[in-house]
Image (cartoon, rainbow, N blue to C red):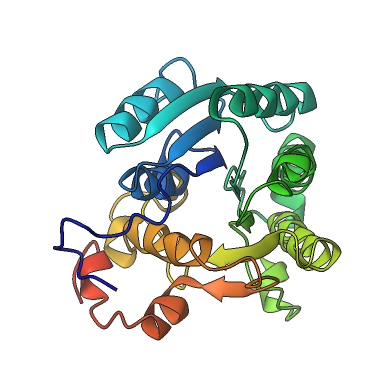
Amino acid sequence: FLPSTSPFTFRKLAGCTLFITGASRGIGKAIALKAAKDGANIVIAAKTAEPHPTLPGTIYTAAEEIEAAGGKALPCIVNVREEQQIINAVEKAVKTFGGIDILVNNASAISLTGTLETTTKKVNLMMDVNVRGTYLTSKACLPHLRKSKNPHILNLSPPMNLSPMWFKNHCAYTISKYGMSMCVLGMAEEFKGEVAVNALWPKTAIHTAAMDMLGGAGIEKQCRKTDILADAAYCILTKPKTFTGNFIIDEVLLREEGVKDFDVYAIAPG
């Protein structure tokens, strides 16, 4: 293992193709940029093609950043609620890059509301994006992943803890995120020895545009940067495919990997 200052550092994801949902901003984009530094190919499967009135970034601005970081980018308009858009993007990825090595199911809808405050529209959105979207994107990528040397699926979803406290304040959201985690549980076993399937979740809140909308002004002081998830994802995606069926917390994994200073990830150190 060569220190990162060495010009000959082995770039573990060089030439790998990553299909990342919701990669136009936030955590998805951070994971994309980390892989791009290795010279990876990134399929940006996200729905923002035109600039959004309040949210930063489109699939095209993300593509420019990925290319600038050293990767190759393929922006695809994908709303994971539309199965045909997923299938089209997967076909385009395979045609452009010759295959798919890694799928990151990052696209997610969130409403931290109680049962009576959660509109049916929001319930449908969370179930469609989080559970169904993750399931269908995995299904579309799996035939290609099986042909890869070291294939991985990584879902941004929590360890399944059935304590009522995780359900009581936002039942629909928790059900939808646990649905993603159940995809990990099932698919890791179903494709054991063929494709690694794992889940990654942050220990703390992560500062993204979504967090600004949920938490309001000043919330970022309680948050970490998206870099912590990008670094943890990189650790997982460079492990052999025998590393599967794990529910990983970013900080726990990075401590095991020897990271000591977590202040670098803090928005407000301390």
Q: Residue at x 27, y 63 (%)?
A: 221
Answer above or below: position of 102 versus 67.
below
178 sits to left or right of 264:
right
Which of the pair 223/118 is nearer the observer?
A: 223
Q: Is residue 173 visible?
A: yes
For the N terminus, the quadrant is bottom left
Residue 13 x %, y %: 43, 51
Residue 165 x %, y %: 67, 77
Residue 55 x %, y %: 40, 31
Which of the pair 245/57 is nearer the observer?
A: 245
Q: Residue at x 52, y 60 (%)?
A: 237
- Considering every residue shown, the one lying at the far front of the view is 8
6 sits to left or right of 202:
left
Residue 250 x %, y %: 45, 71
Which of the pair 30/101 is nearer the observer?
A: 101
Answer above or below: position of 97 versus 17.
above
Answer above or below: position of 151 versus 18.
below
Q: Residue at x 40, y 18 (%)?
A: 51
For the C terminus, the quadrant is bottom left
Count of numbered labels shown in the rendering:
0
Q: Quadrant of residue 182?
A: bottom right
- Considering every residue shown, the one lying at the far top of the view is 50
Q: Is residue 205 visible?
A: no
Q: Quadrant of residue 230?
A: bottom left
